[in-house]
Image: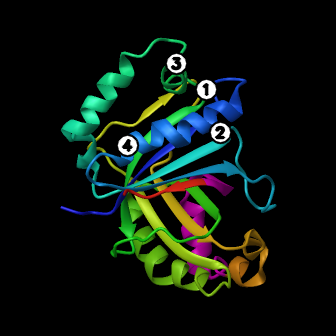
């Protein structure tokens, strides 16, 4: 069953041979996952820098990979398991081994909560990712706010194409090592021009009394703006 989900991987380059490592990731590592049924696309991003003065991203890794998948069950597919077993057997000096043990590595599967429509990867070059935690007794109210008030207001901003919210699934345990971390909730925005994030329309989207109250309930919030460096769809 297609549920709209993503695999998020945050990491730093595991080697000083960063250009070579990026080439390997784009031509070997990512395509191996796209060969698994249920993987619908992969994009890689690199932190853009201090694009939004109001953004904070202490300790966030340089690179982000986003895999679009049908559901968390794709990682139980025989093709995925066989591929992981093959990778585990590679020697310690391989890019695969180094990547799987690099600094600030965090990998998790998130289910899309809003909107409840199938996602198509757009040609936009930038991504805003907000990460945060929401108390359990406020999550229903939070989900109602983000879908009915906040995202519709944000989408009035020229240059912002999509808004999606996600929750970390408990079906597949996340992996965080060497200082890596994941939040329970994500909001992801496809952006044509990062200057849109400094516009008055975008800033005003979160200033209503209800928005201010909801934001007062959120903890451990970070936001990072990324620039796309790679995109690939299944054949």
Magenta stretch encompasses residue 86: no
Residue found at x 51% / y 36% = 106
Q: Is residue 181 left or right of residue 160?
A: left
* Percent of width and height locating residue 207: 67, 79
Q: Earlier in the sequence, mark 3 or mark 4?
A: 4
Q: Quadrant of residue 208?
A: bottom right
Residue found at x 62% / y 87% = 156
- What is the secondary structure assignment of the residue under circle 1? loop
Q: Earlier in the sequence, mark 1 or mark 2?
A: 2
Which quarter of the rendering shows the N terminus? bottom left
Q: Find the distance from the CA under tag 1 to the CA under tag 4.
A: 22 Å
- What is the secondary structure assignment of the residue under circle 3? loop
| Location of mark 3 (residue) | 94
| Location of mark 4 (residue) | 33
Q: Nearer the viewer, residue 150 or 155?
A: 155
The reply to whether the C-beta atoms of the residues labelled 1 and 3 are less than 8 Å apart is no
Which mark lies nearer to you, 4 or 2?
4
Which mark lies nearer to you, 2 or 3?
3
| Location of mark 2 (residue) | 61
Q: Which residue is situated farthest in the front direction here?
A: 235
The reply to whether the C-beta atoms of the residues labelled 1 and 4 are less than 8 Å apart is no
* Percent of width and height locating residue 200: 77, 82
Q: Earlier in the sequence, mark 2 or mark 3?
A: 2
Whether residue 226 is situated above or below residue 194 in the rendered picture: above
Which mark lies nearer to you, 1 or 3?
3
Q: Find the distance from the CA under tag 4 to the CA under tag 2.
A: 22 Å
Q: Is residue 188 left or right of residue 68?
A: right
| Location of mark 1 (residue) | 103
Residue found at x 67% / y 48% = 46
Q: Find the distance from the CA under tag 1 to the CA under tag 3.
A: 16 Å
Residues in magenta? 205-229
């Amino acid at each position: 069953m297609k549920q709209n989900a993503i695999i998020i991987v945050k990491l730093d380059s595991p080697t000083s041979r960063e250009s070579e490592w990026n080439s390997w990731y784009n031509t070997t590592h990512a395509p191996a996952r796209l060969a698994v049924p249920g993987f619908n696309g992969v994009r890689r991003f690199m932190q853009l820098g201090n694009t939004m003065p109001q953004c904070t991203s202490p300790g966030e890794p340089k690179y982000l990979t986003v895999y679009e998948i049908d559901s968390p069950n794709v990682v139980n597919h025989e093709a995925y398991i066989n591929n992981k077993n093959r990778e585990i057997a590679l020697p310690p000096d391989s890019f695969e081994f180094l990547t799987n043990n690099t600094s600030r590595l965090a990998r998790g599967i998130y289910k899309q909560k809003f909107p409840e429509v199938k996602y198509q990867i757009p040609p936009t070059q930038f991504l805003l990712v907000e990460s945060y935690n929401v108390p359990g007794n406020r999550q229903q109210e939070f989900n109602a706010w983000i879908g009915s008030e906040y995202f519709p207001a944000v989408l009035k901003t020229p240059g912002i194409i999509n808004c999606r919210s996600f929750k970390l699934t408990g079906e597949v345990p996340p992996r965080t090592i060497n200082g890596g971390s994941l939040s329970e909730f994500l909001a992801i925005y496809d952006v044509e021009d990062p200057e849109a994030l400094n516009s008055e329309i975008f800033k005003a989207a979160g200033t209503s009394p209800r928005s201010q109250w909801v934001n007062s309930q959120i903890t451990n919030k970070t936001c990072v703006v990324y620039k796309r460096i790679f995109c690939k769809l299944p054949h």
